[in-house]
Structure formats: structure tokens, C-alpha cells
Amino acid sequence: MDHRATSARVARADAVHHLAAELGDWSAGTGPLFRRLARALAEAVDRGVLVPGARLPSERALAAATWSSRGTAVAAYDLLVGDGVIERRRGSGTYVAADGRPADEPGLPADREGTALLARLVGSGMGPTPGAPAVIDLSIAVLHDAPGLPDVTVSSTELAAPAGGDDPWGRVELRAAVARRLTAQGLPTSAGQVVITTGAQQAIHLAAACWVRPGDRVVVEDPTYPGAIAALRAAGAELVGLPVDRHGVDVDALEHALADRPALAYLQSAGHNPTGVVLADHRRRRAAELLGRARVPLVEDVALAGLGRAGRRPHGLIAAALPEHPSVVAGSFSKELWAGLRVGYARAPGPVAGRLARIKATHDLGSSGAGQALAARLLDHPDIGAFLAHRDALLDARRRLLADQVRTHLPGWRADEPDAGLSLWVRLPTPDAERVAHLALRHGVAVATAEGLAPIGGHPDRLRLAFALPEPLLEEGVARLAAAWARR
């Protein structure tokens, strides 16, 4: 008997069980198990339990010690390798990286989870098509190109003028332009009811700060916009999810949820992220009736309102039937005009608007005066209508192309074309979207799963594919997805 080999195996077993004990109740919380395990391992590195250069157990041994599957352990290690926390050495094993910290990846934005993983996976041996980007990102639904956007200029003299640019309320001319637009959509609005924000995301944060306290229940659609989930959870909310179908939120479920008197309801009426549905008129009227009767405050997100199919009539608003109801209509121009224009708004009855402005003052004193001035100029430009019509036609073509490409090259996938927005909500024939997303990254295409889009988890068979990129990149992206799917 080789006593040294036996002693080594015992030592390794002791080490892995010691590590499992240090991880504690790692499976508690939200999100896929592999991400929870990865977070627990990264925290062990931060605490010094795992020191730089330390050898980690094999995936199989880690899975056995943590009572998880080998797939969970493999995916957790993949995530940590991509983020630079650990490294694999061919023929030797897996080790904590030299500094035990995520590495920054040049050329990729650093403000969303997983960008380091994208670059490392794509650089791991499966090369993309020559001339195409290393990663075709179908996970981010923003309009990066804006051909035909009117040229506008703002002078330094105008920026220095006392037009409200350094005021938490925002510039007067932009607030007036927003008020005119909302009034035209059936919601009578004055400039005194509008607070300019840094995107719709900040408007949601302000509303959460206005009405939500730790432990409060908040009603949201399931799935829903991930930024809203993050903002509401940051305020300490307990989220109550409501189903969404092709007509929008289930209003019977909304009635049931409102009976428990939640602190707030967050709904997307004019274009739902991620499904792309528009709330049907009869449901919009019913939702307004239910919210008014329950006196539950409303955040109505209309950030995608300007991104409906070409030729469709403007969408109505829930708040139009509740003009004095405690509500916030949250909108954005970064989706409608250009992703680099981080300007949004919050519309609310006068007393609520004043409270939002006071809360905003504690956040940043006021949004960028230059961005506000540019937005105001664009909204009043005589060619803005022509630009929006051209943009609608461009997005219609891209949406149809992506849907056709998915149906042609991935025939088992179901890709319904949305009524609004910038993405397809795709159903896979199997409930393993997370695994498919990892395989896709290895083939050089990024897609979004339902993680972060669902308030309590779920939708394991869903992917969100954005169609905002130019058509050649959409075609190449689907080709890479098909290659990944074939290797699953």
C-alpha cells in the first residue's frame, strides 16, 4: 500500500471539507446556484481563507463536499476564471490567482457583471469570424448607432445661463418639452410636475426612496426590467411578481396582490422589458381602476414608449386615468434617441414631484446641464420626426431579421416578435438557458438569461436577444449561437 498517496488523498479530502465548512450556507439567497457558489468562493478569497496560489479542489470533489452538482461547480469555476479570481493550469489543476482579484479587461465596459468573463472565454481558443468583433453582444438592448440624428450644438454661453441646469428639478425648457409630450399622450402635465433625471433608472430609484422602506412589499411584473429589481431591492423591498402574457400584466393577479396593500406597484405599460408586449387597453383601464381603489402608489415605466413598431399609434398611460394619484411616470431619452444621452424624467403630481426633487438633490444636486440642453434641442428640432421615422424603419428591419435568423438557424427556438422595445424574448426547447449562455460566450456571442430579470428566479428556458446592432452583426451573432447550440 502506498501510504504517502493515501495520506495525500486524506489531506485533500480534509481540505475540501474544511473549505465547504468555511463557505457556510452558500446556497441561500437568489440567483442560479453556480453564481451563489462562485460568490461564496470569491468571499473566501477576500477573507484570506483561500490565499493567492492555493490549489482548489477538483470540480467533482467540490460538488460532493458542497452537496451540489458537478455542473454547478464547473460553472462556478468558469465564472471565477473569467473574472480573474482563479486560474486553471493545464495538467496541474485550479488555483487562486496571484492577486486573487478580478482583472480589468481593456476595451470592454466595466459597469456590468461578466465583461471579464466574456473576453476571457472568447480568447480561450474558439476564434470568431475574421473581421467580426471578438464578442457580439446581444445582451444589451441599447441603440448604439443613431444614423440621421439631427446635428445640434449648445454654446458655452447657453450652458452658463441660469436655465436650471444645476437645479435638481432640471432645465426649464426640457421640463416644458417633456410636459408637452406627456400631455399629447393623454396625461395633462405642466413643467412643475416634471423632474429631469439621469435616465429612467434614476427616476425609479427616486420613487423607491420616496415610498419604500425595508421589508415593504412591492408589486412588479415577472419578468421585468432588471434595473427596477436592483433599485427596489436596494431600498429593502420584498418583491411580489405578477405574470405577464401577450396582453401585458395579469390584472387578476394584480387585484389579488393589491389586496395585501403593498407599498408600491411598478409596471411597464408602453413597452415591456424583456417581453416587448404593450399593455392592452382593457387591462390598462382595469389596472388604473384597481390602483385608484387601493390607493397604492404607482411607478409607470415608459422608457420604451418611443420604440414601438413603425406606424403604430402612441400608447396610452395608466397614469392618464389617475391624474392626481400618487404616481411617477418614468421615461428616458437614451433608449429613444441615443444610448449616450443619459437623460430621463420623472412626472408626478406637484407634491410628489417636489419630494422627488428634494431626494434627487441629496443624490447629485442635478443632472448634466449639457445633456439636458442637447435633449431639449433634439426634441424641438424640425427634423426629429424624420429621424424617428427612419429609426423605426431601421429597427423594424433588424427585428424581423433577427427573428427570421433565429427561426431559420435555430428551429427549435421560439422567437415572437415584440410590439415595442429592442429585444426578442426567446423560449428554448429545454430549461437550460444559463448553460446555453455560457456555451454562447465560448463561441463569441453574449446573450442575456432571465437571471436579474425575474424577481424570485424562474424562466430557465428563456433568453433575451437584442436586435439593436447592425444587420451583419445580427446574422453573425445567430450563426455563433447556432454553433454553440449544436455543441451543447
Image: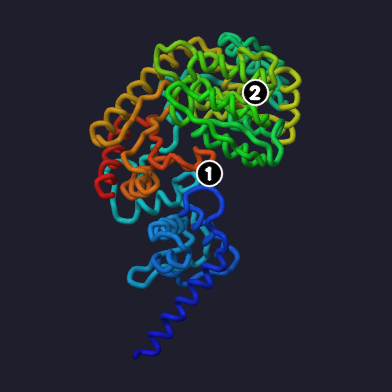
Q: Which residue is mark 1?
A: 111
Q: Identify the residue at horizontal 38%, vertical 23% (top origin).
A: 395
Which residue type carries mark 1?
Asp
- Percent across and percent down for residue 331 are 57, 23
Q: Position of residue 269 (x, y in %)?
A: 53, 21
Which image quadrant is residue 148 in?
top left
Disc 1: CA contacts within 10 A as few (<14), some (14-19) or many (>=20): few
As helix, strand or loop, the secondary structure at mark 2 comes to strand
The amino acid at mark 2 is Val
In the depicted structure, whether residue 370 falls above or below residue 69: above
Q: Quadrant of the N terminus?
A: bottom left
Q: Quadrant of residue 63?
A: bottom left
Where is residue 182 shown, x and y percent of the image?
Answer: 59, 13
Q: Residue at x 71, y 23 (%)?
A: 169
Kindly indicate whether the residue at mark 2 contacts the one at mark 1 (C-beta within 8 angstroms).
no
Front residue of this view, candidates 315 and 267: 267
Q: How many marks?
A: 2
Residue under label 2, please give it: 328
When the figure is inspected, residue 351 is found, relative to residue 27, above or below; the finding is above
Secondary structure at badge 1 equals loop
